[in-house]
Amino acid sequence: MVRGPQRPVTTDIREQTGLGELYMRSLVRAQLRLSLTVLAATAVVLCGLPLAFLLVPATQTVHVWRIPLPWLVLGAAVYPVVLAAARYYVRQAERLEREFVALVERQ
């Protein structure tokens, strides 16, 4: 089988051909899946905390440095969770982009 000259995938992406759109759509879909996963996990944790404090009444009587435990957790301990989720998202998004670039350059 004789093949004609091959075009680089970057040309397909730049010229927005069907193949280029397919590559870009796969990248966008992977990033969307990642963002929805991180969003859902973060929402479960952050929305679950007030629910846990409501369902476990003993937590309402616990004080740390004269501050009620629910206030302390919801007012301060939430930020490291959000920071960890953001850091995870950025690292995974960069990994997806590196894989995409490697795939495009390999073609």
Image: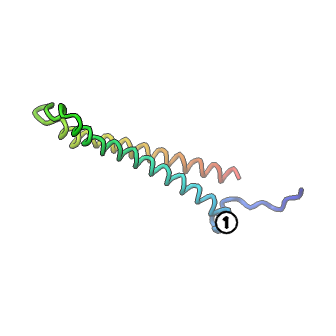
Residue labelled with disc 1: 18
User: Which element type, helix, strand or loop, lies under badge 1?
Assistant: helix
Residue 17, horizontal then vertical, whole percent: 67, 67
Say which residue appears at 27% left-offset and 40% top-offset: 49
Residue 90, horizontal then vertical, whole percent: 44, 47
Residue 61, horizontal then vertical, whole percent: 13, 32
Whether residue 95 is situated above or below residue 61 in the rendered picture: below
- Residue 7 falls in which quadrant of the image? bottom right
Residue 4, horizontal then vertical, whole percent: 83, 62
Say which residue appears at 58% left-offset and 59% top-offset: 25
Say which residue appears at 54% left-offset and 55% top-offset: 29
Image side of residue 40 versus residue 50, left or right: right
Mark 1 neighbour class, 10 Å CA radius: few under 14, some 14 to 19, many 20 or more: few
Image side of residue 100 versus residue 93, left or right: right
Please, which residue is most extreme toward the front here? 55
Check the picture and name the quadrant holding the N terminus: bottom right
Please, which residue is most extreme toward the right here? 1
Say which residue appears at 44% left-offset and 51% top-offset: 36
Task: Please state the total of marks drawn on the protein image.
Answer: 1
Q: How is the image coloured?
A: rainbow
- Residue 21 falls in which quadrant of the image? bottom right
Q: Nearer the viewer, residue 90 or 61?
A: 61
Q: Amino acid at mark 1?
A: Gly
- Residue 74 falls in which quadrant of the image? top left
